[in-house]
Amino acid sequence: MSSDVMVMGGGIVGLATAWELLRSGATVSVLERNLCGQEASWAGAGILSPLLPWDYPEAVTQLTQFSAHLFPRFVDALQAETGVDPEYQASGMLVLPDSSSQAYVEPGTFDMCSRMLLAKHWCARHAIPVQEVQSSQIAPSLSRDTAALWLPEVCQVRNPRLLQALIRAVKMLGGKVLEHAEVAGWKIERGYVQSIHTVAGERHSAGQYVVAAGAWSRGLLAEHAAALEAWPVRGQILLFKAQPGLLEPMVFDERDNFYLIPRRDGHILAGSTLEEAGFDKSTTPEARETLLARAQALIPVLAEEMIAAHWAGLRPASPHNIPVISMHPAISNLYLNSGHYRYGVTMAPGSAQLIANMILGKLQPLDVTPYQWPHRAI
Ligand SMILES: Cc1cc2nc3c(=O)[nH]c(=O)nc-3n(C[C@H](O)[C@H](O)[C@H](O)COP(=O)(O)OP(=O)(O)OC[C@H]3O[C@@H](n4cnc5c(N)ncnc54)[C@H](O)[C@@H]3O)c2cc1C
């Protein structure tokens, strides 16, 4: 099999990259170790924004805002082409702030002014609508009535549906999707990838290669990982089945670092844990208990018998949550699009466009130096 570009990894980042390249006229193949769209991208909550965007470096803000701006057209085109509705909606985010914590402003600098004030200033600077409200005004079912921040334009998407649409769209544009094809090794000569081989011993070649294997990217690159800082961070989520309308907005409780995400059909996601557990993707009774207790503390009617599912996924962690979207420092036809950590769904359309522009030699719409490999210090 030979194509212009080979994408390794069939999560949201790999699939969005493949689709972007196909739409630009390239021929693309996707190699996926298991089935596409079953790992972190499936497991995520689908919030299309950093949880507290004012707590992140500018490189994260730049990419998430660029991606948020692309999202409406991204989902419209996917839905029009595939007929799959990814349930993209601006359900808004209600933030219940933790007034005791400090605020990150710039590297090494901490502002002691109130979190809410800082958040409002940050939103004003970035043209993000925000209001100070009483939480009961926006979400009457919450047991905690407190001064809160309301971000009405924060959107969400239903991950499994977005992935289903992307897989279909990639295939419809002629992308070759090879599942159960685990990349196991490289043939590299004179700074150039000649081919890769899979666990089954099949050899595949392409003009350019993109690693988009999420938490597994470092392992896939093996001795070619070139100082890449990447590691897995497990996240667990509980899914409740409630009556539609019990909760309308997304809610983030800063005190417990905990969110509730309502879907249209009444499902409510409660998450998520942040655990360093290596590549262990199991769910744990401790996390189930903690997530249930936090969910019930916010909405008392949520009960054990309403739990419809409990799952875990492995986030591709990176320093400061800044992904690498870059050519390899020493191998000229090898690229990496990985390390999106907590915001890979949010960043997917944006980082797909940036990596495609690099491969196709097009101008970039923003400064891509923060995403270079190896990472620059921020
Ligand atoms: C609990 C949880 C909640 C989250 N919530 C949000 C949220 O609300 N909003 C948000 O924006 N983000 C969220 N995230 C983060 C987001 O899900 C990830 O950043 C994103 O899914 C990363 O996508 P990816 O394609 O890089 O990785 P993955 O989806 O993990 O895909 C990587 C793929 O590579 C494949 N692969 C691995 N090794 C090989 C190999 N050797 N050969 C071939 N294929 C290989 C894997 O099988 C996998 O399919 C959340 C994550 C978790 C776990």
Image (spheres, rainbow, N blue to C red):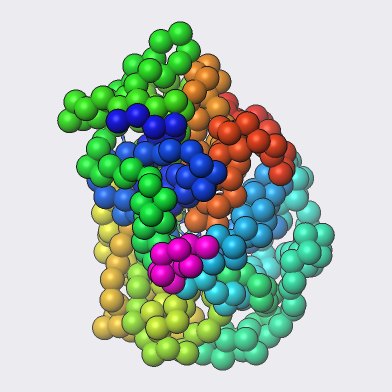
| Horizontal and vertical percent position of residue 88 | 52, 71
In percent of the image, x 74 and y 77: which residue is there? 131
| Horizontal and vertical percent position of residue 102 | 70, 57
Position of the N terminus by quadrant? top left
Q: In the figure, 85 relative to 73: above or below?
A: below
Q: Quadrant of residue 55?
A: bottom right
Between residues 15 and 160, which one lies in front from this camera angle? 15
Q: Quadrant of residue 199?
A: top left
Q: In the figure, 165 relative to 233: above or below?
A: below
| Horizontal and vertical percent position of residue 315 | 42, 49
**Which residues lie in the magenta part?**
77-86
Q: Is residue 41 visible?
A: no
In percent of the image, x 37 and y 39: which residue is there? 29
Q: In the figure, 357 relative to 332: above or below?
A: below
Residue 368 inside the magenta-drawn segment: no
Left or right of residue 54, residue 25 in this image:
left
In percent of the image, x 52 and y 51: which residue is there? 348
Between residues 249 and 293, which one lies in front from this camera angle? 249
Left or right of residue 366, residue 290 in this image:
left
Left or right of residue 245, residue 307 in this image:
left
